[in-house]
Image (tube, grey):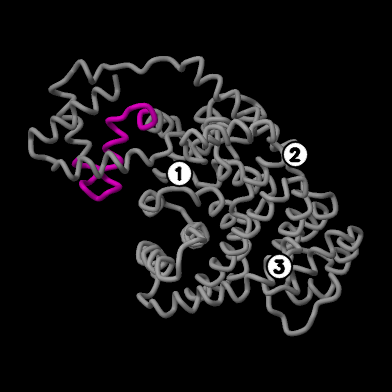
Amino acid sequence: MSLAKLQKFIQYLRANNIMAQEDVLRAVRQMSTFDRRMGQLGAFRGFIQPEQINTVLLEQARSGGLFGECAARMNLLTQQQVGLLLKLQKDDLFLFAQAAVTQKLTTTDKVINHIKSFLGTNPDLAKETEPAPTEEKIGIDRQIRSVLKNIEEVSPLPATAQRAVVMLDDPGVNLDKVGEVLTLDPGLTSTLLRVVNSAFYGLRDKVTSVTKALIVLGIKKLRQLVIAAAVMQKFQSVPPAFAQKYWENAVRSAQWSKEIATLRRMAEIDEMFVCGLLHNIGQLLIQQYFRTHVSQIDELVQKGKKPVEAEKTVLGGTHADLGGFLFNVWQMPKDTIQSTMFHHHDLALLQNTPNLSDAVYIVHLAASIADLNPNLDALAYAEQLEALWNRYRPALKLPDDPAAVERMAESVESHYGQLIATFTGKA
């Protein structure tokens, strides 16, 4: 019945010359990009910090209950905010209004006044009540909780990495002792040093010990690299062909993230590299720990469903959702969690979402570039690259400089060979 109410509201807007047909279509298209889950809508409205969604989901997985109930119990949402989000979540009329504001077709005050006027002339629609949750919806909620519990069970980092990260989080950390702990795991140490000596950092002198790596990089950067190296160690049961494709995309996304951060003269360009490198971590998680679900996802994709929608249907969430949840469990930095969570979201929606870090937009652009068709000829690639650049320029305050984009593309390719060898052992 909610859809019928929206249709009547659209007729009301047209009949009163409040919104043109083209603007109505723009709002409807924007409306279709909304993720109706309460956490996502709460972040969009600025009611909850984006990364805190994962904290509530963890509480849900452990104790049960609805998202709104858990968020209110944890004082992350008020009861009033929960009520507003439920209305936005279930009522197409209010979601359309939010979409119209997002597209800058009207203001919040104006559209709310139009809704009040419309409902005043349609009292039966104003009294409409929402149906109780269906068994299918209840089943999906149970499925999500099951998936999140499974992630929490498989999430721990390798023991050595976990111990090192805890030590690095201590303000009074003894770096020599951290070095001693890391050297207890030869595989992790080897991977770590391989990354440190790669094109990732471009150091003049080769780093031959973990202790020297600590001195050269510092605590914050080493913590990131320990986790990156641990990821490489942890996800070794992923099918080789998938792993190769994953790291090829990850390396390009990482280097593009670093290039964009460098162009913007950001202080933490290495952190942007790690954000780009690990933004698709949820794909590895699904491939290694949810193998029984992969065939179901693939089957839906073959039938024409988008991969992220297929993941949501089968698992209750996308690889971006699962990756963000995992990184929250690992207590990764906010930039890493957010860029992982939102790299598939609609750009227009992100630009209207408060509390997002610049890393979200950087990785979003880097991932979009890395996803360009590899079979494109040079001219077609250059055209699509320029189109992407111009689309993201306002959000990232990028210069209108085609030559700079070309230089960055050349730099990415020049580093690619060594980087892919570093992360896969194959050139």
SS for tag 1?
Answer: helix
Q: Is residue 112 left or right of residue 180?
A: left
Q: Is residue 267 above or below residue 330?
A: below
Q: Is residue 352 magenta?
A: no
Q: Is residue 283 above or below residue 14?
A: below
Question: What is the three-letter code of the residue carrying label 1?
Answer: Ala
SS for tag 2?
Answer: helix
Locate the N terminus and report the quarter of the image it occupies.
top left
Pointer 1 residue = 43
Question: Distance between the Cα atoms at labels 3 and 1?
Answer: 41 Å
Please state which of residues 16 and 315 is positioned toward the viewer in this rendering.
315
Q: Is residue 212 above or below residue 162?
A: below
Pointer 2 residue = 154
SS for tag 3?
Answer: loop
Using the rendered view, name the quadrant where residue 131 is placed.
top left
Tag nearer the camera, 3 or 1: 3
- Find the magenta span and give its range: 87-110
Who comes first in sequence, dot 1 or dot 2? 1
Who comes first in sequence, dot 2 or dot 3? 2
Question: What is the three-letter code of the residue carrying label 2?
Answer: Val
Question: Distance between the Cα atoms at labels 2 and 3?
Answer: 31 Å
